[in-house]
Amino acid sequence: MQTENTLALPVGITLDRFIKSQQDAFPYATGELSQLLRDIALASKIINREINRAGLIDITGALGRDNVQGEAQQKLDIIANIRFIRALVNGGQVVGILSEEDNEITQTNNHYAKYVVAMDPLDGSSNIDVNVSIGTIFSIYRRISPIGTPATEADFTQGGRKQIAAGYILYGSSTIMVYTTGKGVNGFTYENSLGEYFLSHADIKMPKTGNIYSVNEAYFNEFPNYIKEFIEEMRQKSGCMARYIGSLVGDFHRNLLKGGIYLYPPTRKAESGKLRLFYECYPLAFVIEQAGGKACDGREDILDIIPQKIHQRSIIYLGSDELIDNLEEKIKTHNHLMIKQLELV
Ligand code: P6P
């Protein structure tokens, strides 16, 4: 069925042909974004190969140092970061890169490039050693700094609704690249023997509701009461399932296809949330909204959060339309009661 969002293209066409067909649908497209998406796909193919042989060539495990987030860097984190940066530098379409693994913005010296990329090159990397799915998350903006100059922080801090493309690659039982350019969401499964991505999930639409909730229950006692109540209500739903693999891309992708909600509420250790706004929250919020789901932090839509610092974190709830509405209604009631109680003081 053709929707206003996507061209009716047969499942099974290659990612390259799909990108080209989408470019043809944009009258002023000049091919740079298409090339950038191909560069990202190329880097993911290389990382896919590294991941698949990680146990054999001693690139699993920790590197023995922390990243800017204070998290133990895994060897594959660094390899993935290097591969993506190299692919984006050589591809020539990106003037600057914001990576979870680097404190500063990486300048590519492609000063005449139109785009900047924010990325988590390998999310969930603590799962690498135990063969649990991991992922890459990316977000693309059109630069606002003058062509011919280096990238600036302002190129990145435009806000979530200024993203022109976003997506992820999930290295799981199969490797799938899912992305949006604002015209719907499509998924491409990688065929190793051919080295190609093929359209396998055309025009993904998230179910309006769902029975799956994904949260780290170890922090249950630290959550705000309205989150505890929401989780208790989810547990009462017939067919309710708790599914949490500790790898954001894996939890997100399952819920996107089956319906459900992923929650990372405030905890004692992460009062502003754990996930990073620029290269986890914004891109997945763009994808989920394009697929008919919702993303908020309990106060506003994720895409409306005004960015402050390039490595800032956010509370995040990513889910089916009705589940997010239920949660936001609960938060609103809670806040209303709080105000009433304060008025009585
Ligand atoms: P916790 C991995 O470090 C990550 O960023 C996401 O992939 C994952 O969903 C989350 O953190 C897990 O965090 O606190 O439950 O271990």
Image (cartoon, rainbow, N blue to C red):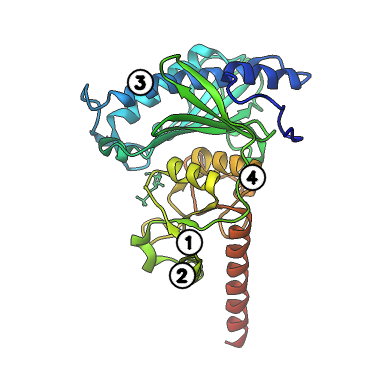
**Number of other residues with Cα within 10 Å of mark 3, as a class: few under 14, some 14 to 19, many 20 or more:** few
Residue marked by disc 4? 289
Q: Position of residue 324 (x, y in %)?
A: 59, 58
Alpha carbons under labels 3 and 4: distance apart = 31 Å
Distance CA(mark 1)–CA(mark 2) = 14 Å
Q: Earlier in the sequence, mark 1 or mark 4?
A: 1
Furthest residue in direction bottom, as rendered: 344
Pick the quarter of the image with the N terminus. top right
Q: Is residue 94 visible?
A: no
What amino acid is labelled 2 in the image? Answer: Glu
Residue 239: mark? 1
Give me the C-alpha separation between circle 4 and circle 2: 26 Å
For disc 3, the marked residue is 49
Mark-to-mark CA distance, 3 and 2: 41 Å
Q: Are marks 1 and 4 in contact (CB under 8 Å)?
A: no
Q: Residue drawn at (45%, 47%), measured in percent from left and top?
A: 275
Residue for badge 2: 232
Compute the Cα span from label 3 to label 1.
Answer: 37 Å
Residue at x 41%, y 53% (from the top left corner): 243
Tell me the mark number nearer the camera, choosing from 3 and 1: 1
> Distance between the Cα atoms at labels 1 and 4?
25 Å
Mark 4: few/some/many CA within 10 Å (<14, 14-19, 20+): many
- Tell which circle, 4 or 2, labels the residue nearer the N-terminal end: 2
**Which x, y percent locates residue 47?**
38, 23
Three-letter residue code for mark 3: Arg
Inspect the image, locate mark 4, and give the three-letter code of the amino acid beneath it.
Answer: Glu
Label 3 CB less than 8 angstroms from ligand 1: no
Q: Nearer the viewer, mark 1 or mark 4?
A: 1
| Label 2 CB-ligand 1 distance < 8 A | no
